[in-house]
Amino acid sequence: MDYEASLDRAIDAMPELGGEEARLRIPDAEAEPDGAFTRFTNISAVADALSRDPEHLHSHVQQELGTAGQFESGRARYNGNFSGADFDEAVEGYVSRYVTCSECGLPDTRLVTENRTEMLRCEACGAFRPVAKGHVSTPNRTERETVESGKTYELEIISTGRKGDGVAERGEYTIFVSGAREGETVRAYVESVSGTLAFARKT
């Protein structure tokens, strides 16, 4: 397969970015008490800095805080008492999950849906991955699932890539499996690993 070579060429062709250019400039979250609720008053400004829909960000914040909430007129409010730091932490989780490319680390990405699976596609290096499931801001794992070249793993194929290969996840890794189809559970031999992307074939 030529995926790794293509990815390497794309990364080599990227311009050098300075630290300030490579970083997002995200406004600090502003929290405002409102009785039994707390308002996230500048959620639209934060979402705009991330180039994301504010309602999408609101849904993630609601999930991270573990509470109910409402979004209206560009503002969000949540049941309970929260600080700006609480909102900032939720935004950090959102950036990791929905904005930052896991390959090049840049925020030049967009959300797309392929075969009913939400994917994050990087405009800078061309990498793409399924959006991580579950909470990403509170993992206290002592063991992390790894993927190593030359090993075989049992994988559930959750979607199909642009070139027809099956796509699976293992921990933080996205694995492209040639010869596999969505919905299958297969044994796959990993031929190469590049960052958090792995390329395998069905055995």
Image (spheres, rainbow, N blue to C red):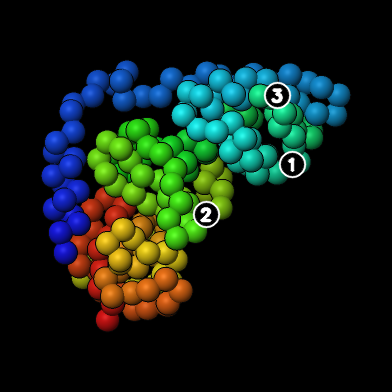
Residue shown at 47% from the left, 28% from the top: 50
Residue shown at 40% from the left, 24% from the top: 24
Residue 190 sits above or below residue 70 on the image: below
- Residue 133, percent from left and from top: 52, 54
Residue 85 at least partly seen: no
Residue 59 sits above or below residue 22 on the image: below
Circles 1 and 3, Cβ within 8 Å, touching? The answer is no
**Which one is earlier in the sequence, the residue at label 3 or at label 2?**
3
- Distance, label 2 to label 1, CA atoms, is 18 Å
Circle 2 SS class: loop
Report the front residue among 39 and 183: 183
Residue 118 sits above or below residue 19 on the image: below
Q: Amino acid at mark 1?
A: Thr
- Distance, label 1 to label 3, CA atoms, is 20 Å
Report the front residue among 14 and 112: 112
- Residue 73, numbered label: 3
Q: What residue is pinned by disc 2? A: 133
Q: What residue is pinned by disc 1? A: 67
Looking at the rendering, in which quadrant would you find the N terminus?
A: bottom left
Q: Amino acid at mark 3?
A: Ser
Q: Residue placed farthest to the right in the image?
A: 35
Q: So how many labels did they put on this image?
A: 3
